[in-house]
Image: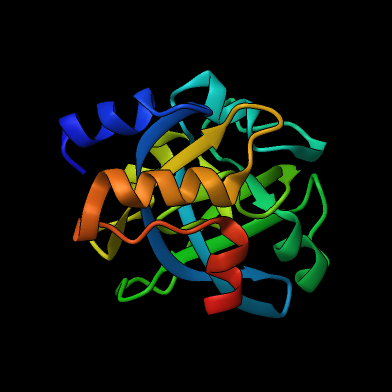
């Protein structure tokens, strides 16, 4: 996403915030359970953080903290206060990075070109990942906005360069 494209998205009606995101895929472990977890950096814009709709706890504020989606919580029995290990796919080390779960958010905030299952502070993201990243754009809408209408407007404005979908469209496709 170019800076001009990001500015265009931010200027669209009903868009509260938009921020380029980088997502990395990996495996998390909690006890004997192992599963996929896409990890993202904590959004910098307050409007995007506000759009994450916390279900429990809070968003990460310190190194070593992670907030996970409610779908990860439900499938893995991870709870706020638990420690999980996350390892990026392709990472040679057997050891993962440990994070303490401090919050649970509703899976898939806003509209994104991709989405994530967990968020950490930018410095933790940089240490834990080493290259298997997917660019994405996180968009949070004004309260009461019609996500499908905004998605259609974004798709028209951005053209064929990007795939734009609501979180629910992403889940249905995945």
Q: Nearer the viewer, residue 9 or 138?
A: 9
Q: Residue furthest top?
A: 46
Q: Is residue 106 left or right of residue 131?
A: right
Give percent across and percent down for residue 12: 40, 29
In this view, 152 is above or below 6: below
The residue depicted at 23 percent of the width and 53 percent of the height is: 159
Where 43 sits versus 151, above or below?
A: above
Q: Residue at x 22, y 36 (%)?
A: 5
Q: Residue 97: x and y, percent?
A: 48, 56
Q: Position of residue 131 (x, y in %)?
A: 23, 60
Left or right: where does residue 153 sit relative to residue 85? left
Whether residue 106 sits left or right of residue 119 in the image: it is right
* Snapshot colouring: rainbow
Q: Position of residue 101 (x, y in %)?
A: 70, 46
Q: Residue visible at 27% across and 30% down? A: 8
Q: Observer-nearest residue: 93 or 25? A: 25
Left or right: where 162 falls relative to 44: left
Q: Is residue 174 visible in this depiction of the protein?
A: no
User: Which quadrant does the N terminus fall into?
Assistant: top left
Residue situated in front as seen by the camera: 28 or 1 = 1
């Amino acid at each position: 996403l170019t800076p001009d494209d990001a500015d265009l998205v931010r200027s669209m009606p009903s868009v509260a915030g938009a921020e380029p995101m980088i997502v990395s895929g990996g495996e998390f472990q909690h006890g004997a359970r192992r599963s996929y977890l896409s990890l993202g950096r904590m959004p910098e814009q307050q409007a995007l953080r506000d759009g994450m709709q916390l279900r429990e706890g809070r968003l990460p504020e310190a190194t070593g903290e992670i907030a996970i989606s409610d779908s990860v919580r439900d499938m893995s029995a991870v709870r706020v206060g638990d420690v999980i290990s996350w390892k990026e796919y392709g990472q040679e080390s057997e050891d993962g990075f440990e994070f303490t779960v401090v919050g649970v958010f509703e899976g898939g905030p806003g509209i994104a070109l991709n989405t994530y299952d967990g968020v950490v502070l930018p410095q933790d993201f940089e240490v834990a990942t080493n290259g298997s990243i997917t660019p994405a754009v996180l968009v949070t809408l004004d309260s009461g906005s019609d996500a499908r209408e905004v998605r259609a407007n974004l798709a028209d404005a951005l053209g064929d360069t990007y795939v734009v979908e609501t979180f629910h469209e992403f889940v249905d496709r995945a």
